[in-house]
């Protein structure tokens, strides 16, 4: 308790310096938080798409009649690896589109003709056979197009890997910079108390007794920065989800990660990060003075 009181006392005597440090660490955590938010949502989108990895949508030409649909269905069902084939009429496709558009669905009511094609939803037993089923389906007479998620997944995998790598590199860089900033801040405080530290050491004070107030000062900097940055990200993310969340869900059929769940995990990460940065920076700054 004494060490914590001393830490707050030091912060009170150096308000400007500590305030600037907290702002710098908060800014860096905000950048890390943005990387985290982007990565988590892209990862969710990728996982959702992967659930549809075993589904191939086969679009049929408008000239094909019901007898032709039955023939096409029987042909596709005969392909190796196909578990089920479900016919999806254009009227159902239009209704699905209206549901996605939500309150803007009225814009589709003025269409004279349904522009969407009839299609088959082809379910495969194993993703390994999906490519061959898609290729064979495209060769069936009367088939206009085949939509398969392989290309989309490959691109998403590259984006996810890029964001993950970028996040790790940015995190490592910002952590190092944050530790240096905290270390310099604590070092300036130590300079002001150098004589006092010498007297304490002369009177027999242990290294931990001398070091503890500075470590607590660094930890407090980290905790305050973590709390402020998490709060700001919560406000920003909540506002963004209110503005574009429904549009994303309608267009991509994927919901964004809930703000409460995201921010709770981010707070845990930031608190651990803040304590680590504060502790490391303080230990580095005080070490040379204890070695004298």
Image (cartoon, rainbow, N blue to C red):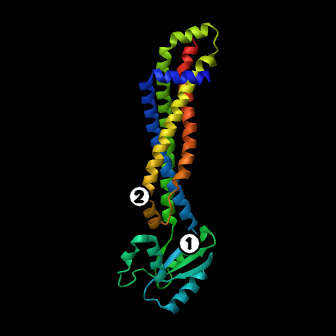
Instruction: Report the residue marked by disc 1.
Output: 55
Q: Quadrant of the N terminus?
A: top right
How crowded pointer 2 is (Cα within 10 Å; few <14, some 14-19, many 20+) is rated as few
Vertical order, 158 against 204 (above or below): below
Vertical order, 217 against 133 (above or below): above
Q: Which residue is drawn at the image coordinates 62% and 18% (left, top)?
A: 209
Q: Which residue is drawn at the image coordinates 51% and 70% (left, top)?
A: 148
- Nearer to the camera, 116 or 207: 207
> Whole-percent x and y of residue 162?
48, 50
> Whole-percent x and y of residue 198?
56, 9
Say left or right for 179 vs 205.
Answer: left
| Mark carried by residue 290 | none
- Report helix, strand or loop for mark 2: helix
Instruction: Report the residue marked by disc 2.
Output: 243
Vertical order, 13 against 153 (above or below): above
How many badges with numbers are in the image? 2
- Report helix, strand or loop for mark 1: strand
Q: Quadrant of the C terminus?
A: top right
How crowded pointer 1 is (Cα within 10 Å; few <14, some 14-19, many 20+) is rated as many
Which mark's residue is nearer the viewer, 2 or 1?
2
Residue, far bottom: 67
Residue 255 seen from this side: yes
Q: Which image quarter: residue 199?
A: top right
Q: How far apart, in angstroms, are the residues tagged by discs 2 and 1?
A: 31 Å
- Nearer to the camera, 94 or 77: 94
> Whole-percent x and y of residue 261?
56, 52
Pointers 2 and 1 in contact (C-beta within 8 Å):
no
Say left or right for 3 vs 230.
Answer: right
Q: Which of disc 1 and disc 2 is earlier in sequence?
A: 1
- Nearer to the camera, 269 or 167: 269
């Amino acid at each position: 308790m004494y060490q914590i009181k001393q830490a707050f006392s030091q912060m009170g005597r150096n308000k400007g310096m500590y305030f600037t440090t907290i702002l710098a660490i908060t800014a860096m955590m905000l950048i890390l938080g943005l990387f985290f938010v982007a990565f988590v949502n892209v990862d969710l989108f990728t996982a959702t798409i992967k659930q549809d990895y075993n589904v191939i949508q086969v679009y049929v030409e408008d000239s094909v009649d019901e007898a032709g649909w039955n023939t096409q269905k029987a042909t596709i069902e005969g392909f190796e690896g196909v578990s089920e084939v479900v016919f999806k009429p254009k009227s159902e496709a239009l209704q699905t589109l209206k549901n996605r558009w939500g309150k803007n669905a009225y814009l589709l009511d003025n269409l004279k003709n349904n522009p969407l094609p009839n299609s088959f939803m082809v379910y495969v037993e194993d993703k390994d056979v999906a490519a061959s089923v898609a290729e064979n389906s495209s060769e069936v007479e009367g088939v206009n197009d085949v939509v398969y998620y392989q290309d989309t997944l490959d691109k998403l995998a590259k984006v996810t890997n890029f964001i993950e790598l970028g996040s790790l590199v940015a995190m490592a860089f910002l952590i190092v910079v944050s530790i240096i900033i905290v270390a310099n801040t604590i070092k300036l405080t130590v300079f002001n108390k150098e004589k006092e530290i010498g007297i304490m050491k002369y009177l027999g004070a242990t290294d931990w007794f001398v070091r503890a107030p500075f470590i607590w000062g660094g930890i407090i900097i980290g905790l305050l920065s973590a709390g402020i940055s998490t709060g700001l990200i919560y406000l920003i993310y909540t506002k963004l989800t209110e503005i574009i969340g429904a549009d994303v869900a309608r267009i991509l059929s994927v919901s964004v990660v809930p703000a409460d769940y995201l921010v709770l995990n981010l707070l845990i990460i930031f608190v651990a990060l803040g304590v680590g940065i504060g502790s490391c920076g303080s230990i580095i700054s005080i070490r040379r003075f204890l070695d004298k």
